Image (tube, rainbow, N blue to C red):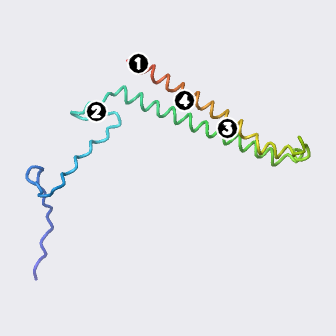
């Protein structure tokens, strides 16, 4: 009975493994540091911290704006659906609930757009002020 040979991994260092192909070997990717400098790598720790803080504040602003927008739109839709008297009131022969459906959402969109834009600009100004102070 013959034993099957054990599997052995054969490796070679970079210099001795010159393959005769026409394509060059892709360069290895640098390791992700998340703000921690690796030996021989230059990472500006303060800049990385400021960048992360800006991204987090912009994400918080975006999520808060979307959450507020959804709450207001759901409340407006519920008000239109649950208040039957809005169908009895007419303006220029059109029921008020129809007019609210047609035109009340645009000012809400504009208000939240302006609020988000002002908040994002404020975050950017704070970020620039912190970076210039260095």
Element at badge 2? Answer: loop
Residue at 12% in and 77% down: 3
Identify the residue at horizontal 42%, vertical 27% (top origin).
50
Q: CA distance from mark 1 to mark 3?
A: 34 Å
Q: Is residue 56 above or below residue 100?
A: above
Q: Are marks 3 and 4 in contact (CB under 8 Å)?
A: no
Q: Could you say whether the residue bearing mark 4 is in a helix, strand or loop? A: helix
In the image, what residue occupies the spot 76% across and 39% down?
104
Q: Quadrant of residue 116?
A: top right
Depth check: give the residue in front, 7 or 19: 19
Q: Is residue 40 above or below residue 102?
A: above
Q: Are marks 4 and 1 in contact (CB under 8 Å)?
A: no
Q: Which residue is mark 2?
A: 37
Residue furthest toward the top? 133
Name the disc covering residue 120, or none: 4
Name the residue that disc number 3 marks: 109
Horizontally, residue 118 falls left or right of residue 79, namely left
State the residue position of label 1. 132
**104 or 71: which is nearer to us?**
104
């Amino acid at each position: 009975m013959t034993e099957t040979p054990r599997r052995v991994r054969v490796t070679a260092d970079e210099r001795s493994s010159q393959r005769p192909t026409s394509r060059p070997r892709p360069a290895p990717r640098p390791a992700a540091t998340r703000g921690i400098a690796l030996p021989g790598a230059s990472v500006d720790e303060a800049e990385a911290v400021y960048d992360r803080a800006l991204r987090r504040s912009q994400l918080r602003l975006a999520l808060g704006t979307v959450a507020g927008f959804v709450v207001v739109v759901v409340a407006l839709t519920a008000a239109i659906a649950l208040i039957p008297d809005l169908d009895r009131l007419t303006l220029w022969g059109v029921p008020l609930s129809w007019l609210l459906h047609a035109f009340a959402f645009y000012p809400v969109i504009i208000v939240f757009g302006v609020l988000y834009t002002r908040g994002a600009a404020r975050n950017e100004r704070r970020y620039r002020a912190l970076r210039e102070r260095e």
